[in-house]
Image (spheres, rainbow, N blue to C red):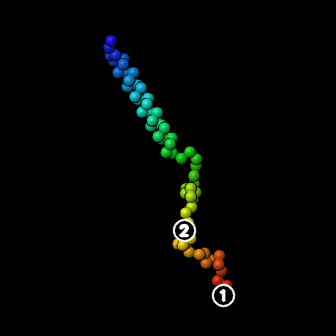
Amino acid sequence: MSNGKGGIREMTLVFTLALLGVGLASLLAFIPWYETSAAESAIVDVRIPLFDPPDSAAQGSGR
């Protein structure tokens, strides 16, 4: 029993399709699926009250 060139060709095809599938799955896993604008690129807006200066316009000078 000998595989010959047909067996090598079949194994090459199987490995090529497997690598193509893994590459496509990786591509789809890491690209965004929805359109985002530059202003809304952050999912979470982190604010630390200790370091955020108060808005002087909101407090008003009143003097």
**Mark 1, other Cα within 10 Å: few <14 / some 14–19 / many ≥20:** few
- For the point 41% across and 26% down, which residue is it? 14
Relative vertical location of residue 57 with respect to residue 12 in this rendering, above or below: below
How many numbered circles are shown? 2
Mark 1, secondary structure of its residue: loop
Question: How far across and how far down the image is residue 16, in percent?
Answer: 41, 29
- The residue under label 1 is 63
Relative vertical location of residue 51 with respect to residue 30 in this rendering, above or below: below
Q: Do we see residue 59 in this rendering?
A: yes
**Mark 2, other Cα within 10 Å: few <14 / some 14–19 / many ≥20:** few
Relative vertical location of residue 43 with respect to residue 6 in this rendering, above or below: below
Mark 2, secondary structure of its residue: loop
- The residue under label 2 is 48
| Figure quadrant of residue 8 | top left
Q: Is residue 54 left or right of residue 21?
A: right
Question: How far across and how far down the image is residue 15, in percent?
Answer: 40, 28
Residue at the outermost bottom position: 63
Q: Amino acid at mark 2?
A: Ile
Of the two numbered discs 1 and 2 on the same chain, state the one appearing first in sequence. Answer: 2
Q: Nearer the viewer, residue 59 or 47?
A: 47
Q: Is residue 39 left or right of residue 3?
A: right
Question: How far across and how far down the image is residue 36, in percent?
Answer: 57, 52
